[in-house]
Image (cartoon, rainbow, N blue to C red):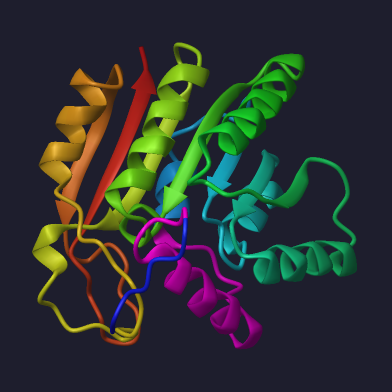
Amino acid sequence: MQLVKEKNQPVGETVNLAYWNEFYKRFYIEEESTFCSYIKSRIDKDTLIIDIGCGTGQDIRSFYREGFCVTGIDRSLEVINSNNNVIKQAGYRDSIDFKQVDISSESELSKFIQEKLEEARGRKKKLLVYSRFFLHSINQQTEEVLLKTLAKQLDNGDLFAAEFRTIEDANKEKVYNNHYRRFVDSEQLVKNLEEVYRFEVLEYTKGTGFSIYKGEDPYLARIIARKS
């Protein structure tokens, strides 16, 4: 697949946005991910959750049903509109919403995080920035925007949790293999979180068996880090 760069857009991500807009028109997931279950067992209910790159919103809805205040964000307007229709039809009320946010825009992301921090503090809650299968869908430039923004905006004690494909996954078979992926050097990411962005990494593990789908068993990393 040839990646095309439009003006002011990171390489790969313009192509990815078009791909996911079409994908979400025909694809819907209801069951929570194994990562969602993993995180729920490790956080308190006094946590406000932001799901960055929320996709079809199955994890956000699962968090909501467990009593968490949640917001899902994605750059795809297609999936944001679909998610908002789902929660409207389901009769969900306060404490859940979906918004379109361009994560590659530092100013747009910063404004959104500030709003959520104010909401979290008003509700006397900590903030968790949750990211499943997102870091490997963005390039290095956007990753730096995301982590730089979180480092600036989050308060001590707020959390960042991520599950993503690593460099060890690059040559493994994929069910969907027709879109942009970046295989993350997880060791370097942990080092950057601790030394550059001033997070304390509480949990870090990698391997297979985390998220098996249609016979695909990707090599993934899981990280939970606390702003310090």
In front of the other: 116 or 138: 138
Quarter of the figure with the N terminus: bottom left
Count up the numbered dots.
Answer: 0
Query: 51 above or below 15?
Result: above
In front of the other: 220 or 107: 107
Which residue is at a point 48% across and 21% down the rendered structure image?
158
Residue 198 location, quadrant: top left
In front of the other: 11 or 148: 11
User: Left or right: where does residue 78 sit relative to residue 173?
Assistant: right
Residue 61, percent from left and from top = 67, 57
Residue 70, percent from left and from top = 67, 42
Residue 124 location, quadrant: top right
Query: 105 above or below 206?
Result: above
Residue 125, percent from left and from top = 65, 20
Which residue is at a point 37% across and 22% down the rendered structure image?
226
Residue 132 in view of the camera: yes
Magenta-drawn stretch contains 24: yes
Quarter of the figure with the C terminus: top left
In front of the other: 185 or 11: 11
Magenta-drawn stretch contains 69: no
Outermost residue on the front side: it is: 7
Residue 26, percent from left and from top = 62, 88
Which residue is at a point 20% across and 29% down the rendered structure image?
192
Range covered by the magenta-colored residues: 8-34
Residue 48 in view of the camera: no
User: Left or right: where does residue 159 sit relative to residue 191?
Assistant: right
Which residue is at a point 76% across and 49% down the rendered structure image?
97
